[in-house]
Amino acid sequence: IRDREGGAMAYDALATLLERQGRAPEALTLLRDAVAKAPRNQDLQFALGTLLERQGDVAGALSRMRAVLALKPAHSAALNFMGYTLAQWGRDLEEAERLVRRALALQPDNAAYVDSLGWVHFQRGEAKKAVEVLERAVDLSPDEPAILEHLGDAYLKAGRAPEAVRVWKRALEVLTLEPEAAEPADQRTTLERKLKALPSTAPGR
């Protein structure tokens, strides 16, 4: 695993399988052991960071991403991960924007990175700017449920409820067509709750 990307991918795949089986502690142990054996393997550090974030250890996840960036300062995925995570948790939005913009400088047409920038604006309460940026993210990736949900949230904050309903419903449609997507049930529940909170917008109407 020290020198071969394939080895890191195999560890990541096995950890993901364990996590989906409800064996997250085993997945964490697996990746921590792998990182201990190959601390300079940025792919393993990144995989451990993403797993830690999914398990609620935000501080641990950010620490791993800093380790990735120490190894490769131009690691666009780590830059975006840190920026989005800081924005998601409402922490240091100025730093979040700086990190996301560094990622975008490397990959300006990456829909996920554009989405992250839109979410920074949303968390700042800049609804109009968030809509503008998130619409571009949807243009780049029209069928990504998470981006559609974010755009709907921004529309609602901007006072554009009908448009929020439209894109939330589109996100639900995509999730229905892609049942293998990660955590689709949780996202469906969230979207349905948002729709039901608005008058006369129950899913399917």
Image (cartoon, rainbow, N blue to C red):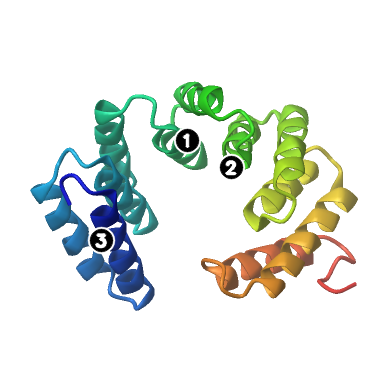
Name the foreground residue: 88 vs 159.
88
Residue 114 appears left or right of 17: right
- State the quadrant of the C terminus: bottom right
- Label 1: state its secondary structure: helix
Q: Amino acid at mark 3?
A: Tyr
Residue 146 percent coordinates (x, y): 63, 53
Q: 193 or 40: nearer the eye?
A: 40
Contact between marks 2 and 1 (CB within 8 A): the answer is: yes
Residue that mark 3 sits on: 11
Q: Give the residue at x 33% y 56%.
A: 51
Q: Which mark is residue 80?
A: 1
Above or below for 69 versus 135:
above
Q: In the displayed orientation, state which residue is furthest to the left.
A: 37
Left or right: where does residue 9 sit relative to residue 81?
left
Whole-Å distance between the Cαs marked 3 and 2? 24 Å
Which badge, 2 or 1, is on the more N-terminal residue? 1
Tag 3 secondary structure: helix
Q: Is residue 86 left or right of residue 15?
A: right
The label on residue 112 is: 2
Quick one: 15 or 99, which is closer to the camera? Answer: 15
Tell me which amino acid carries mark 2. Ala
Q: Give coordinates of residue 124: x percent, y percent.
A: 61, 29
Q: Are marks 3 and 1 in contact (CB under 8 Å)?
A: no
